[in-house]
Image (cartoon, grey):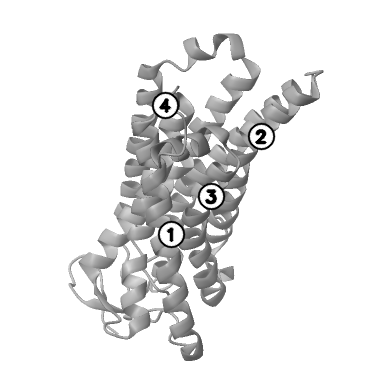
Amino acid sequence: MGNYNSSSPESFILVGFSDWPQLQVFLFVTILIFYSLTIFGNTTIIALARLDLRLHTPMYFFLSNLSFLDLCYTTSTVPQLLINLHGLDRTISYGGCVAQLYIFLALGSTECLILVVMAFDRYAAVCRPLHYTTIMHPLLCQALAIISWVGGLVNSLIQISLMVTMPLCGRRLNHFFCEMPVFLKLACEDTEGTEAKMFVARVVIVAIPAVLILGSYAQIARAVLKVKSTAGRRKAFGTCGSHLLVVFLFYGSAIYTYLQPKGSYSESDGKFVALFYTIITPMLNPLIYTLRNKDVKGALWKVLGKGTDSG
């Protein structure tokens, strides 16, 4: 086998779900529907956050960032998957593979950081309600969003820079897109040193944010339990419940994929887990936030002409 590194512009074959031909038509139709719902739901969230003045708050500013991330995140992989399932073309060039890998990692890393920022916002709202508007100043919100985006781009650049130095053997990627754990399985030689550095980068971008989020919600839980009013507790838990559900969905699959040793990673299982966090979670996020949020539902009815003109 020849080496396929940054100096070899060879293409790769994306196996996708060709091992399960009986599932391909079902997957194509299902994923196309989910992708359409993802685009509609997240675009709606972004539009509502811009159109309704009641949603011009830090929470919805960060929610808009999350929706935009989900739009880009799912679009970086799903069109390729639909082409793959249709059987039109299962190949991708080395450059295209690296570009897809960089974009996917950058968006995923940014989402990790945005979820931390959203947890901080909920902490400030519940634990420091009297100082919330002072703490979550618009300039700070913008700065936190920019830091999240830059942090995601830099983390992805570090991992990609380490990856392209490794000689690769073979052209068969047992996945429906270029994802790091599968890409690393093509390494021709022992890459323990490089993989150790990449693992540290993943811990920084996945594990540490997860710990910070859990810490924030531990403080939030303590504050809520001190609230004597049942209605007050319900409101506080309702405010944070949606975000916490999104966190569990996203981080659960991310930890499974990126924080386990290369040798124990199952490519078959990994494909279905990847379906979850590239398609299902981005589709569910708008539903999770809108179905549990009176402000968003009110803004939606207002835009549709069924609400009042007040507010």
Q: Secondary structure at mark 2?
A: helix
Residue drawn at point x = 40 percent, y = 63 percent: 35
User: At numbered mark 4, what does the secondary structure look like: helix, strand or loop?
Assistant: loop
Q: Amino acid at mark 3?
A: Leu
Residue drawn at x 53%, y 63% as measured from the top left: 276
Q: Are marks 3 and 2 in contact (CB under 8 Å)?
A: no
Comparing marks 3 and 4, which lies closer to the viewer? Answer: 4
Q: Is residue 151 left or right of residue 301?
A: left
Q: Earlier in the sequence, mark 1 or mark 3?
A: 1
The residue wearing badge 2 is: 238
Which image quadrant is residue 278 in?
A: bottom left
Find residue 103 and report its image quarter: bottom left
- Residues at marks 2 and 4, CA–CA distance in whole angstroms: 26 Å
Whole-number angstrom distance, CA of label 1 to CA of label 3 = 10 Å
Q: Which mark is residue 309?
A: 4
Q: Label 1, secondary structure: give it.
A: helix
**How many neighbours does mark 3 have within 10 angstroms: few (below 14), some (14-19), or many (20 or more)?**
some
Instruction: Give yes or no for contact between labels 1 and 3 (Cβ–Cβ under 8 Å).
Output: no
Q: CA distance from mark 1 to mark 4?
A: 28 Å
Q: Is residue 268 visible?
A: yes
Residue drawn at (73%, 22%), measured in percent from left and top? 232
Give the crowd class for mark 2: few <14, some 14-19, many >=20 residues within 10 Å.
few
In the rendered structure, which disc, 3 or 4, sits on the residue that comes first in sequence?
3
Q: Which residue is mark 1?
A: 37
Q: Nearer the viewer, residue 148 or 225?
A: 225
Compute the Cα span from label 2 to label 1.
24 Å
Tag 3 residue: 287
